[in-house]
Amino acid sequence: MISYGRIEAIFHPLYLIKNFLAFLLGVVILFVSTGKIGSIPLFAPVGFVFAYNSVYFINDLKDFEEDKLDVHKFKTKPLLNGHLNKNEAKALCLFYLITGLMLSFYSGILFGFSVLILLILNMIHTFFLKSLCFPLILNIAIMQILKISLGWLSISNSFENFPFYFMIFLGLLYSTSYLFYKRERGIVDIKPNKKILMTMFKKPINSFFSVATILSFVTSFLLYTFRLHIIVMFLIIIAFVFSVKFTNVKRISLYRTYQILIINVYASVIVSFFLMSYIPELIALNKLLLLI
């Protein structure tokens, strides 16, 4: 019987779910922004998640020697824990890349090129930016914006009513969370206190991306007509961030905890956005907020 480790090595289920939900979030944002929603081409989300799945194999192959020096990565890296060998990783990478791009371009020329650009940005991330913190985090924000925009582009080729500042907020929010996860994850084993928070925010790059995220959030709230959605999304994020405090990270790696947290936030935001667009009382409350 095939083990879960082997399944995870071949399919990357957490990444598949996370990327599909990012795509679906773009579809929901189209609906919230325009009040219209069309049929999603079946091959669009499949093409995207397949094509993007190839980058995880490329990253593991490229960082193989470096990862061997980190004992913690043996838990999550299939090339290190024996669930996958290099030849299998290369074959799977080509399969996902070729199949994903074919399906993406079949879904639409603009959509296909958008997926291709996303892959190129990820290659830049993997091969050139890992030692350059500011460009790395900025590139992650751009990639996240493009990821979510794919849901919009799968249905519409028009950028009319496209919420640029809200997309910027989502991209910065993701990249800032990545920044703190990567650079400040040591604090997970320390009891949080004001001194630790002050130390974190004294770092210029942490402060810059945190302030930029807050400013884009405020701009989005003031500029767009879905104010209730933005408030609820913010509350969902806060709730899940604080829930990490009660998560037993010893049973499940911090890496997986971070991925599951993002999946939960995506899913909760998508469901709440749909509900707030259909329940009359919530629609009325959103209109009331527009008077502020």
Image (cartoon, rainbow, N blue to C red):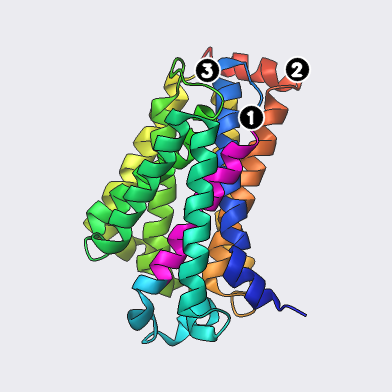
Question: Can residue 32 be seen at all in this image of the molecule?
Answer: yes
Circle on res. 280: 2
Q: How many residues crowd mark 2 within 10 Å: few (<14), some (14–19), many (20+)?
A: few
Q: Is residue 44 left or right of residue 114?
A: right
Residue 183 % position (x, y): 35, 67
Residue situated in front as seen by the camera: 38 or 182: 38
Q: Residue at x 48, y 52 (%)?
A: 98
Q: Nearer the viewer, residue 166 or 146?
A: 146
Which amino acid type is marked by label 2?
Pro
First to last magenta residue range? 40-60
Alpha carbon separation for disc pair 2 and 1: 26 Å
The secondary structure making up most of the magenta span is: helix
* Above-or-below relation of 110 to 187: above
- Earlier in the chain: of badge 2 and badge 1, it is 1
- Taking the magenta stretch, the answer to whether it contains residue 84 is no
How far, Cα to Cα, is label 1 from label 3?
24 Å
- Identify residue for label 1: 40
Q: Is residue 190 visible?
A: no
Tags 1 and 3 touching, CB below 8 Å: no
Which of the labelled discs sits on residue 225, or is there none?
3
* First of labels 3, 2 by sequence position: 3
Element under disc 2: helix
Q: Is residue 35 left or right of residue 182?
A: right
Q: Secondary structure at mark 3?
A: loop
> What is the x, y in percent for residue 90?
45, 69
Q: Position of residue 70 (x, y in %)?
A: 40, 84
> Residue flagged by tag 1: what amino acid is it?
Ile
